[in-house]
Image: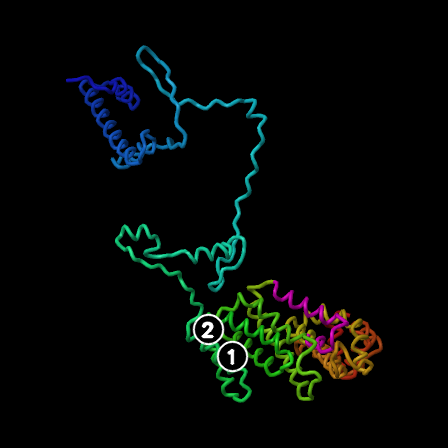
């Protein structure tokens, strides 16, 4: 029997390391031959991986694949992209020891080299990948040019002509994908609804269209089209009161439909509603007597829509209410704006913010605003910002401010706690004039009860 290639002394060393003191020579020889067989088997399979990979140098990954194929435990810690250099050391006569040489580092160079950059803290951010099927243009998403180039690439079977030829499909014609935004039925629905809401001759036709917008659950794909339609009509039809009123009803019907998702379009709806609320030029010029009442109702409807929109979406858009209030307050305090714009801004502030906005923002500015509104009420100014009938608009502003005062009386308990029988004292009248200005204080005292005046002083903590 030939002598085994594997050194039997290694078998004895391993046996002693696991607590086996003595092994017979026959056992050691058989174990050595078995180790030799296992090694040759692993190497044979590893060489097959090397040849199939088109290489002439055996790699550690070939050994790992071979062990995996033979259901053996793989080796750990030997994966490397660089070739290993082995050194040889002698531990005795005829007993060489091979080891992996470590890379020598120049200590001086290691000290003088620049320090690496401090790594950033682990963090994550969220962004919209797509909103209602539309990809927003942000740095995290591909640019429109990249998306367009990807859309033009052929996809599906036959996209690669070489692979098609190999599969036997020599005459495969590839057509680019066509993006169908809306179905024909939805296009017809959109056109007929837009025509119905602007039909002045058929109230039944309009009511049916608005009823469908309130209740139909399949309108999600049409939402951006309706929002864009409303914005265009408001922008180009400021002189047509009927169109403005119907477009606002369209927005109101969409807000009442709880089957659709309007969150991404709130930012686009707010400017459209604000235009009809605070625009200084609405309706024909000069306006007809009947049109004046319609314009007032139009601004009131706009304020109610802003309030409804805020109640529904203020939790998903935290900056919505502050931005609305900031815009309306800026218009209210602008002396160059028309009284009609002031009227819309004030009713918007009262509707959106309630008693808190009246107490903290509107009333502290009324003393300065009294001089502006007093000119219009007394008829000293005939035109303002190119609009006629300023005196009527100024009276509407005064009524809106008086109605805002009533917001401070939010419960009947407030009226029960004050003395409403004894007349007002001079000190109370002076406090009210300091709080809201002489003009509005005189109107409150003249038009309202003693109890309301005292409740206002109590709410204002004066």
Q: Which of the marked residues, 2 or 1, is nearer the chain's N terminus?
A: 1
Q: Position of residue 221 (x, y in %)?
A: 46, 70
Image point 32% across, 50% down: which residue?
162
In the picture, measured across the screen, residue 27 lies left or right of residue 283, that is: left
From where the camera sits, is residue 414 visible? no
Quick one: SS at disc 2?
Answer: loop
Image point 40% across, 32% down: which residue?
81
Main SS class of the magenta portion in the image: helix
From where the camera sits, is residue 205 visible? yes
In the picture, measured across the screen, residue 210 lies left or right of residue 365, that is: left
Highlighted range, magenta: 319-344
Of all residues, the one furthest to the left in this rendering is 1
Closer-to-camera residue (135/87): 135
Residue 181 lies in quadrant? bottom left
Image point 28% across, 55% down: which residue?
170
Q: Which mark is residue 219?
A: 2
Closer-to-camera residue (101/317): 101
Of all residues, the one furthest to the top in this rendering is 93
Q: Position of residue 80 (x, y in %)?
A: 39, 32
Residue 194, relative to residue 84: is it above or below? below
To which residue does mark 1 refer?
A: 194
Residue 37, relative to residue 363: is it above or below? above
Image point 53% across, 65% down: which residue?
264
């Amino acid at each position: 029997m030939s002598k085994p290639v594997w050194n039997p002394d290694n078998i004895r060393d391993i046996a002693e390391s696991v607590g086996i003191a003595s092994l017979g020579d026959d056992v050691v020889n058989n174990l050595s031959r078995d180790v030799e067989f296992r090694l040759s088997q692993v190497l044979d399979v590893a060489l097959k991986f090397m040849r199939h990979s088109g290489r002439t140098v055996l790699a550690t990954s070939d050994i790992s694949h071979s062990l995996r194929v033979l259901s053996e435990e793989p080796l750990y810690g030997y994966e490397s992209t660089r070739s290993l250099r082995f050194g040889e050391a002698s531990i005795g006569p005829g007993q060489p020891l091979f080891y992996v040489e470590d890379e020598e580092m120049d200590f001086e160079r290691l000290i003088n080299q620049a320090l690496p950059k401090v790594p950033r803290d682990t963090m994550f951010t969220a962004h919209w990948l797509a909103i209602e099927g539309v990809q927003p243009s942000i740095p995290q998403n591909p640019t429109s040019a990249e998306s367009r180039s990807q859309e033009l690439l052929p996809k599906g079977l036959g996209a690669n002509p070489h692979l098609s030829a190999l599969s036997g499909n020599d005459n495969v014609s590839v057509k680019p994908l066509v993006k169908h935004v809306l179905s024909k039925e939805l296009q017809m629905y959109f056109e007929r609804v837009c025509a119905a809401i602007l039909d002045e001759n058929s109230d039944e036709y309009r009511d049916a269209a608005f009823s469908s917008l309130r209740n139909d659950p399949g309108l999600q794909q049409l939402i951006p089209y309706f929002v864009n339609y409303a914005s265009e009509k408001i922008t180009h039809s400021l002189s047509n009161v009927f169109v403005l009123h119907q477009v606002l009803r369209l927005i109101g019907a969409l807000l009442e439909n709880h089957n659709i998702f309007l969150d991404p379009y709130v930012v686009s709806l707010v400017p459209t509603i604000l235009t009809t609320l605070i625009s200084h030029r609405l309706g024909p010029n000069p306006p007809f007597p009947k049109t004046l009442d319609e314009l007032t109702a139009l601004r009131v409807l706009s304020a109610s829509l802003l309030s409804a929109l805020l109640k529904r979406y203020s939790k998903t858009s935290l900056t919505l209410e502050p931005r609305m209030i900031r815009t309306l307050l800026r218009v209210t305090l602008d002396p160059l704006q028309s009284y009609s714009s002031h009227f819309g801004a004030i009713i918007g502030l009262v509707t959106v913010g309630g008693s808190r906005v009246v107490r903290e923002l509107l009333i502290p500015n009324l003393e300065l605003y009294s001089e502006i509104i007093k000119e219009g009420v007394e008829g000293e100014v005939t035109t303002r910002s190119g609009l006629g009938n300023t005196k009527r608009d100024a009276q509407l502003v005064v009524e809106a401010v008086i109605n805002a005062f009533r917001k401070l009386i939010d419960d009947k308990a407030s009226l029960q706690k004050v003395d409403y029988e004894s007349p007002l004292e001079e000190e109370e009248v002076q406090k009210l004039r300091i709080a809201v200005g002489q003009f509005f204080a005189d109107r409150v005292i003249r038009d309202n009860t003693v109890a309301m005046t005292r409740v206002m002083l109590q709410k204002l903590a004066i």
